[in-house]
């Protein structure tokens, strides 16, 4: 039934988990649905390390969009944690979106993930939708065969096609999700866009710049640890963060000659922070080589991650 100011209809609220292989565009899609940046993105696979919930308001519906890490074959403790975060997010949802990079086609990891979703005992009758992303990069004639092939592996409740980067199909996806989530009260204030803790969100903005500016030079075992955040008397934020790497040689890469690289990373991250927080930001970065940080329980706690044995 159409809504109106006089008859807004019942409120709806539901958890929608976005699952997929690394680099499927899940974070970009969450940002597009929310309408602002809440998740970091980069061309590098496995950028997302922990679950983050973006909050999208669509009419009278509140969509809690859980951006999960990409699912892949884990090799390290950190990998296991990331994949575990993804499956836990899927298990806690009302509805699951399998987001597929249409430009890559029916990649083996996507078909394996579809099989795993079909066999997952905890999902029960939970609806699973197929979302083909990046359709702006694919001839239209290739999309229907791809959708049919994946639907043969798992009978998806819905199949939709979007480009999170251009916005094509995103509005329609949001409307369909708003109709599908259950009736119930909103769990967050109407103006909230994410469940992220501010200090962790700001650290993620710096990590995004590490990936964007260093690309293949950046070791995957790098992290940004929030140290301190405070508001100055003039309303500006003072943010202190530490960039962690495994070796001194990696520290030299991040710092750059005469500190040029870390200064550029900090300047770009500060601009992102000021836009997100709508205030001036004074960002202070240090770089530390800490061998084995990815196996340090205390570092995981500071990064907002759940320790795995």
Image: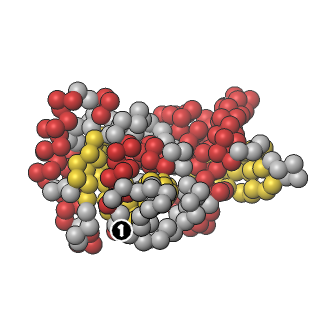
Q: Where does label 1 land, which residue? A: 182
Q: Which picture quadrant has residue 129? A: bottom left
**Which residue does the image show at 30% across and 34% down from the upper left?**
135
**Which residue does the image show at 28% across and 41% down from the upper left?**
161
Q: Which picture quadrant has residue 7? A: bottom left
Q: Which of the pair 165/171 is nearer the observer?
A: 171
* The residue positioned farthest toward the right in the image shown: 233
Q: Is 220 rendered above or below residue 137?
A: below
Local secondary structure at mark 1: loop
Does 68 sit left or right of 130 as displayed?
A: right
Q: Is 19 rendered above or below residue 272?
A: below
Q: Residues within 10 Å of mark 1 (few under 14, many from 20)?
A: some
Does 231 sit left or right of 88 as displayed?
A: right
Residue 287 visible (yes or no)? no
- Residue 45 location, x and y as percent? 41, 43
Q: Which of the pair 11/207 is nearer the observer?
A: 11
Does 74 sit left or right of 253 as displayed?
A: left
- Residue 224 location, x and y as percent? 62, 50
- Residue 27 location, x and y as percent? 44, 47
């Amino acid at each position: 039934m159409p809504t109106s100011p006089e008859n807004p209809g019942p409120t709806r609220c539901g958890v929608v988990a976005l699952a997929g292989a690394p680099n499927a565009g899940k974070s970009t899609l969450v940002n597009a649905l929310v309408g602002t940046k809440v998740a970091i993105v980069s061309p590098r696979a496995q950028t997302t390390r922990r679950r983050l919930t973006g909050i999208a308001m669509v009419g009278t519906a509140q969509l809690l969009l859980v951006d999960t890490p990409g699912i892949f074959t884990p090799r390290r403790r950190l990998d296991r944690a990331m994949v575990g975060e993804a499956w836990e997010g899927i298990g806690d949802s009302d509805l699951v979106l399998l987001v597929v990079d249409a430009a890559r086609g029916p990649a083996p990891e996507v078909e394996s993930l579809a099989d795993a979703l079909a066999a997952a005992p905890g999902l029960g009758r939970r609806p699973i939708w197929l979302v083909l992303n990046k359709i702006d990069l694919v001839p239209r004639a290739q999309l229907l065969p791809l959708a049919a092939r994946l639907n043969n592996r798992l009978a998806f409740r819905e199949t939709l096609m979007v480009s999170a980067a251009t916005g094509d199909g995103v509005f329609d996806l949001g409307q369909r999700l708003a109709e599908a989530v259950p009736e119930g009260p909103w769990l967050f204030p109407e103006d909230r866009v994410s469940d992220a803790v501010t200090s962790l969100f700001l650290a993620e903005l710096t990590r995004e710049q590490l990936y964007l500016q260093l690309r293949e030079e950046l070791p995957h075992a790098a992290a940004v640890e929030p140290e301190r955040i405070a508001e100055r008397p003039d309303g500006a934020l003072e943010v202190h963060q530490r960039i962690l790497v495994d070796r001194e040689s990696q520290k030299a890469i991040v710092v750059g000659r005469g500190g040029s690289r870390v200064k550029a990373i900090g300047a770009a991250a500060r601009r992102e922070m000021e836009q997100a927080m709508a205030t001036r930001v004074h960002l202070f970065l240090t770089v530390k080589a800490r061998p084995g940080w990815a196996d340090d329980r205390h570092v995981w706690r500071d990064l907002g991650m759940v320790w795995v044995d």
